[in-house]
Amino acid sequence: MTFSCQNISSLAQFHTEIGKLLEFPDFYGKNWDAFWDAITGLVETHTASLQKISPKDFEILCQIVKDYNQFFANHEKSIVIY
């Protein structure tokens, strides 16, 4: 599955769109802690636009992905950001 941030113009839009794509529950909190709690599978992202919009949030996303990949290293689950 691939998620592109190419047309994302805000962090709120990022959370809304990723939530729809990955079918997060309606109660998804649309923040980084909720994102961590909601991710459950392979997600590939095109994040150049998010990095331009909000470098700090891009760094947070990268750290969450790194933590996720370490947590699920033995479960054949990973997230790839490019």
Image (tube, rainbow, N blue to C red):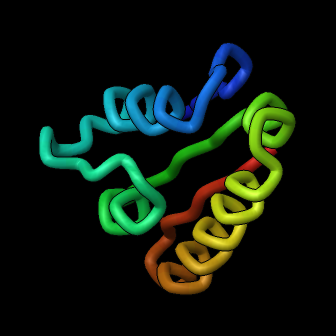
Q: Tell me if 45 is positioned left or right of 52 in this view.
A: left
Q: For residue 2, which quarter of the picture?
A: top right
Return the residue nearer the eye: 2 or 64.
64
Residue 60 in the image: state x and y as whole percent.
67, 65
Residue 21 in the image: state x and y as whole percent.
38, 28
Residue drawn at (73%, 36%) of the image: 50
As drawn, 79 above or below 10:
below
Residue drawn at (65%, 26%) of the image: 4
Q: Tell me if 42 is positioned left or right of 33 in this view.
A: right
Residue 48 in the image: state x and y as whole percent.
84, 34
Residue 34 in the image: state x and y as whole percent.
34, 61
Q: For residue 67, which quarter of the picture?
A: bottom right
Q: For residue 57, which quarter of the picture?
A: bottom right
Q: Tell me if 46 is positioned left or right of 72 in this view.
A: right
Q: Tell me if 7 is positioned left or right of 3 in this view.
A: right
Return the residue nearer the eye: 41 or 17.
17
Seen as rendered, the residue at the extreme left is 26
As drawn, 56 above or below 13:
below
Query: How many numbered discs?
Result: 0
The C terminus appears in which quarter of the rendering? top right
Residue drawn at (53%, 33%) of the image: 14
